[in-house]
Image (cartoon, rainbow, N blue to C red):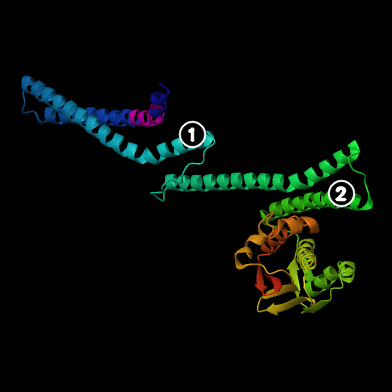
Amino acid sequence: MNKHKKSWFPKKFLIRLTLLNILIVSLFIVLSSWAIYHTACFLVEGMGTMNHWKQRQFNATLFHYLWMFSLIAIIVGSMIHFYFTKKLMKPLRKLIVSTKSMKSGNYPEPLEVTSNDEIGQLIEHFNGLVGQLKSNHEHRQKLVTDLSHELRTPLTNLNGYLNALKNGVIVGDEKLYHSLYKESERLTKMVTQLEALKEWDYISEQSYVEKEKIAIDVLIKESIKMFYWQLQDRNISVKVQVEHVEINIYKEGMSQAISNLLDNAIRYYEGRGPITIIGKRVRSEYHVSISGPSQEISPENEEKIFERFYRLDASRNRETGGTGLGLSITKEIIEQHYGKIACKANEDTNTFWFRIPF
């Protein structure tokens, strides 16, 4: 019963539209036939060559044929109109079915666009809407899954140790409290980075961002100063070669992007040699590269490391406090400046570079 009702529903509009057009066309045909009939009778009567009986016979015959031809015209016209209207509404029926499928929580396959008229444009926009909604749903699902996975380990560690301390199973010492503090610090940092990521997701959708002319070489040097004590503590030297160029940028965002790349180079520093920072003008773009000795990144991971929560070595990153969000945030910021960012591995040295137009 429900199936029959659903199949009947899309045809209701088609039937109403057809009946309305039949009514209008029939009215005009009847009015035209009535006018033709009376005009013909008036003209024949004016000729004066027919008697009264022949005049009545002529009028009756004319009336009969006019009604017969009018009826044929209405029937044939209605059939042709129904056929072409049904063909015209076929995409709309498919659109109705797809909309019902979306209402049930499904994402239907894209509908075929067969014309460039209003219906074709409607279907094209509908396909785009379905694709966007599907992409947003998949993104939310992945984000929730990744976030749950990332939070589970530090929370489990904290709960386990705190429960053991509460029950007297273990006795706290400086090393244990330091470990618990690092886990708590990692959680706090992750939440902070998630907030930053959400902010840049929002900013990337806006057509206007407050930017200003900034000397990018000065900004790079200021970012390096923020890591002075970390560099001193690990005895890491920094080699800086940056050209002076003023660029219209979002200062806070670009400062964060450079700091994230420096933090990454220091965090995963392995071996000897300085961290090299180069900034130079290349035609209408400014290129920045940050290189440092580190564990080699394989070619298949060069693109993945910019994905949210992606980490090359999960265990190592947990120990050093990595969340797998820093490079993702950096990528969002650089792309907001219409730039490009990538990584290039060369034996025991990894180079992260980006370029932005000015």
At horizontal 74% and vertical 76% (from top left) the residue drawn is: 279
The amino acid type of the residue labelled 1 equals Lys
Q: Residue furthest front?
A: 169
Q: Label 2 is placed on what type of residue?
A: Leu
Above or below 20: residue 206? below
Task: Tell me the magenta residue range.
Answer: 8-19
Question: Residue under circle 2?
Answer: 180
Of residues 272 and 39, the one nearer the viewer is 272
Mark 1 element type: helix
Q: Are marks 1 and 2 in contact (CB under 8 Å)?
A: no
Residue at left 66%, top 72%? 345
Quadrant of the rendered image containing residue 73: top left
Q: Which residue is mark 1?
A: 100
Residue 211, image x, y percentages: 75, 63
Q: Quadrant of residue 314?
A: bottom right
Would residue 321 be seen by someone viewing this image from the given angle? Answer: no
Q: Nearer the viewer, mark 1 or mark 2?
A: 2
Q: Is residue 12 magenta?
A: yes
The front one of 5 and 149 is 149
- Going from the N terminus, do you reach mark 1 or mark 2 first? 1
Quadrant of the image for the N terminus? Answer: top left
Q: Quadrant of the C terminus?
A: bottom right
